[in-house]
Image (tube, rainbow, N blue to C red):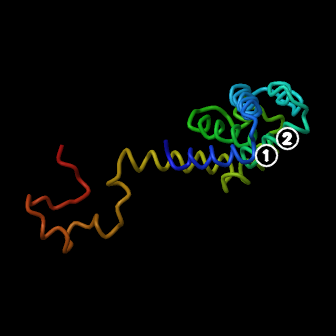
Amino acid sequence: MTFYQQQFIAIRAKVFPKDYLCTQVIRAKQFIDSHFNDPIALQDMAKEAYVSKFHFLRLFKLIYGKTPHQYLTEVRIEQAKLFLQTDLSIAEICFAVGFDSVSSFKGLFKRYTGVTPTAYRTKLSSQSLISQSPLRFLPFFLSLKKSNFQDAQPNGNSDLCVSTN
């Protein structure tokens, strides 16, 4: 058992002497995880936990440190990050993860990640380019034909940017 798990159990025992409440909130969280792309209301989440929506809101925030809506938004943003690695358009991704408006999706995505979905996709593609051909992104001075770096090469290769495959 990790330190985190021990701390969670200690806090849970102090705050929640009733285990069944934690189990019910966890069940509702799993419901959110599996139905993130559907329109989910607070009432639907509370129904999964078998408690009133106000009690559910308090319990969820106490256990997870955020409201159910904040958690749902985070799950949707994480799924959108995965979809941005595909060729789907931003609008298709927006609706696939459960948002109703492209503009609100872009705003929330930027708030959570710091960049727009388009910039995030561009960053992903540039990272994949660098990993596919890292020699292409060497600084200019390393690609010169005659430099001090090339004199010390043991194999006599005069161009550092050419691979010897």
Q: Nearer the viewer, residue 57 or 155?
A: 57
For label 1, the residue is 61
Amino acid, disc 1 = Lys
Q: Position of residue 71 (x, y in %)?
A: 74, 42
In the picture, measured across the screen, residue 39 lies left or right of residue 97, that is right
Q: In which quarter of the image is residue 32?
A: top right
Task: Check disc 1: other Cα within 10 Å, few if <14, some if 14-19, many if 20+.
Answer: some
Whether 155 is drawn above or below 42: the answer is below
Amino acid, disc 2 = Leu
Q: In which quarter of the image is the C terminus?
A: top left
Q: Are marks 2 and 1 in contact (CB under 8 Å)?
A: yes
Q: Residue at x 69, y 26 (%)?
A: 34
Task: Check disc 2: other Cα within 10 Å, few if <14, some if 14-19, many if 20+.
Answer: many
Whether 56 is drawn above or below 4: the answer is above
Q: Position of residue 90 (x, y in %)?
A: 70, 38
Q: Which residue lies furthest to the bottom in this view?
A: 148
Q: Which of 42 and 55 is in front in this view?
A: 55
Q: Residue at x 20, y 70 (%)?
A: 149
Q: How far apart are marks 2 and 1 (CA)?
A: 6 Å
Q: Which of 3 and 95 is in front in this view?
A: 3
Q: Which residue is drawn at 87% across and 30% down?
A: 51
For label 2, the residue is 57
